[in-house]
Image: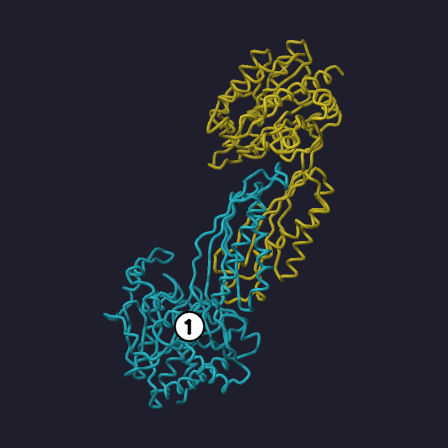
Chain colours: A yellow, B cyan
Amino acid sequence: MNVNPKRFLSNLHELRRIGASGVGKGVVRPAFSETDIAARDWLCAKFSEIGLTPYVDPVGNTFGLAQGKSILIGSHTDTQPEGGWLDGALGVVCGLELARAAMEAGGPAISVVSFQDEEGRFGVTTGSAIWAGTLPLDQADNLTDANGMTFLDARNRMPNRAKEFLDPNIFSGFIECHIEQGPWLHEAAETIGVVTDIVGIRDCTITFGGEQNHAGTTPMHRRKDTFQALSQFSQKINQRFQNVVVPCTVWTIGHVDLHPNAHSVVPGRCCFSMQWRDGDIARLDRMEKIIRETVDEIATEMDMQVTFGPVLGIKPTAMDDHLQAILSNAAGSECAGKWRKMTSGALHDAANVSSLMPTAMLFVPSINGISHDFAEDTNEADLIAGLIVLAKAIEHFGNQ
Amino acid sequence: MNVNPKRFLSNLHELRRIGASGVGKGVVRPAFSETDIAARDWLCAKFSEIGLTPYVDPVGNTFGLAQGKSILIGSHTDTQPEGGWLDGALGVVCGLELARAAMEAGGPAISVVSFQDEEGRFGVTTGSAIWAGTLPLDQADNLTDANGMTFLDARNRMPNRAKEFLDPNIFSGFIECHIEQGPWLHEAAETIGVVTDIVGIRDCTITFGGEQNHAGTTPMHRRKDTFQALSQFSQKINQRFQNVVVPCTVWTIGHVDLHPNAHSVVPGRCCFSMQWRDGDIARLDRMEKIIRETVDEIATEMDMQVTFGPVLGIKPTAMDDHLQAILSNAAGSECAGKWRKMTSGALHDAANVSSLMPTAMLFVPSINGISHDFAEDTNEADLIAGLIVLAKAIEHFGNQ
């Protein structure tokens, strides 16, 4: 099975021209936009051209089906409102080239997929979540985008849609190739990341209730200043996490809402978001314990009310051991000393698909760790290396 | 000169009924509202009753004029949208009782004033600022309240308005009695505060510019998280101010604006307010130096942009030494061991009037330091003590 790097890169650039926008290699192809649908039509034409059967399911997930039981390769072709040219598109075009090369070589059977709305115009990895059954269709249909359009109206814009969802049992496994979106591989000058798990996320809203007061007449010792509570919390958490976290653990206070948010008033209420991510449930638990203890400690010290909102989240998703091993072997033989096992800090369709079949992910570097931005890019050599590692792994998987 | 505490308290309660609202002793009498104008009409009737000549200037400052050169006593009768019953009303009703007692005693000559819009529906101490010339009338006329009404339209609602502003030279000095609005006297179980100065305020907006990024894929060591810059700034400032400040110094971060203010995004921009107040210009300067150095230090350490907005402010205003001495003597003889010299952390009409004539202020306690709230109150004994100290001081001033 011989992949054709030139044909692969040419297809990537052909797809990029659908929705090409902004500076550099920017692309604008949000789910169900005209350019997104055009990209899926382009993909279906390519499927036909190489002998796969195009199949669009009721929510716009776009498949190119091989005959018989096949391994599924892909990702998504929709983008952020202002996206880069690779992101999920890379995984889909990888699938296209691999399917073509396999077809030319007489096997193994490879199907291709571009899931719909991975970027969450309506939800979070909407298309694969519906297929995996974690998001019921009738619930999804009521989801709306930022302009109030419903998912139902949006999916009615997709032509040629099929009557039924595909039975996942026609696939033997799923491999998603994606750019890393973070800086780890780029910083280490490595070429391949074999994903061990997709991190879990926990997210909650915490509110300190203090005392709104005159910023001139209220002495410092009499204040119950909720911004001071927040800033103390943030500093203490940073210190206390030091003994718990690993290098890929992240935590973020990204949303802050002070009341009444005025220069001359001691803020009497502060509502803020606390989000933390890690691949290990036990570590997520330990972090949550520290967060709760620290919030309570500050509330007690500063004589404040505290409300700890519900902790929403997604569990870490482990990738299939066997597929990981095959990908690692292929990476080791093609890119010796230039690859690593790693956690994915971002959510991907693979997290949903993993409940349907054995699933794995392969990363290639993002230059400077940039993604979801027109400036997103990856060196051609790394794109080709990713394709070749995938080809090796699939040959191995297909021969078992 | 014998003041009548019963008559004084009765007048305070009579005035309170104009605009009485909410719970407890709450009052709603914003500048130029129907209740505010009714309170000024009530005051003019009282002036006539005790032999003072009512005089309303073009912006609604309401005087009761004695014959010949007189000392001016007063404050303001307008309130916050939800105010307490004392605030400025106390100083005006003190003036009324003192003028009446002086009239009965055959001297000294006392005039009374209720300035307009001290609470800043349209500006900041608007009426006294226009009289003092710090706010030009044509500029004030264009100021609007929260609903878009102009100051010009508002002042046209005041009946009986005079053609000219009063010549300040008809007054020999101004004394403003006011509730403290802070907790210092209440906490120390003291009765009288003689104000040495009204604090200066400095206020600016500071913006950290970092890097907006994915909260999942951006490792901690690669972040330029502007919320983290703010929280570090706040903690460092608190430490560094320790060696500089005095107990009445205050500083506040009351307004925070993160961008894009989303749970899953490392905030790339953080704009926040920094306000600090102290009675001493040199200390305000030292604090500003620490603020600027700390902001620059953090911006350098975290590789961020920083924008330091214009520093707006009001200089500290010293009260007249001679009037302070007279008030202190009176406080010392009437309330031995129960009074103090102190700074005013809030702005008052006295700050404007001090540019026109010798000016001083007297504070009585606020129970639990509460003000600008329906719950605002002061013990009757303290109200009466304030009146008596003022009477002693004015007798002394009038006899010089």
Query: Where's residue A83, x and y in %?
Result: 52, 30
Residue on which the image places disc 1: B88
Query: Where's residue B250, x and y in %?
Result: 53, 64
Q: Taking B106 as reference, is A366 above or below it?
A: above
Please state, as top left, top right, bottom left or bottom right, where the N terminus of chain B lies in the image: bottom left
Tell me where residue A224 sits by quadrant: bottom right
The subunit carrying tag 1 is: B
The amino acid on which the numbered mark 1 sits, given as a three-letter code, is Gly
Query: Where's residue B168, x and y in %?
Result: 30, 75
**How many other residues sit within 10 Å of disc 1, few (<14), some (14-19) or many (≥20)?**
many
Q: Which residue shows up at 47% across the image and 85% down it?
A: B329
Q: Which residue shows up at 73% across the image and 24% down it?
A: A328
Question: Is disc 1 placed on a helix, strand or loop?
Answer: loop
* Left or right of B44 on screen, residue A148: right
Tell me where residue B368 sits by quadrant: bottom right
Q: Which residue shows up at 55% across the image and 25% down it?
A: A77
* Left or right of A301 on screen, residue B199: left
Query: Where's residue A218, x and y in %?
Result: 53, 66
Most distant residue in the left direction: B163
Please state, as top left, top right, bottom left or bottom right, where the C terminus of chain B lies in the image: bottom left
Q: Taking A105 as reference, is B202 above or below it?
A: below
Q: Nearer the viewer, residue A67 or B319?
A: B319
Tell me where residue B265 sits by quadrant: top right
Q: How many numbered discs, if any?
A: 1
Q: Taking A55 as reference, is B104 above or below it?
A: below
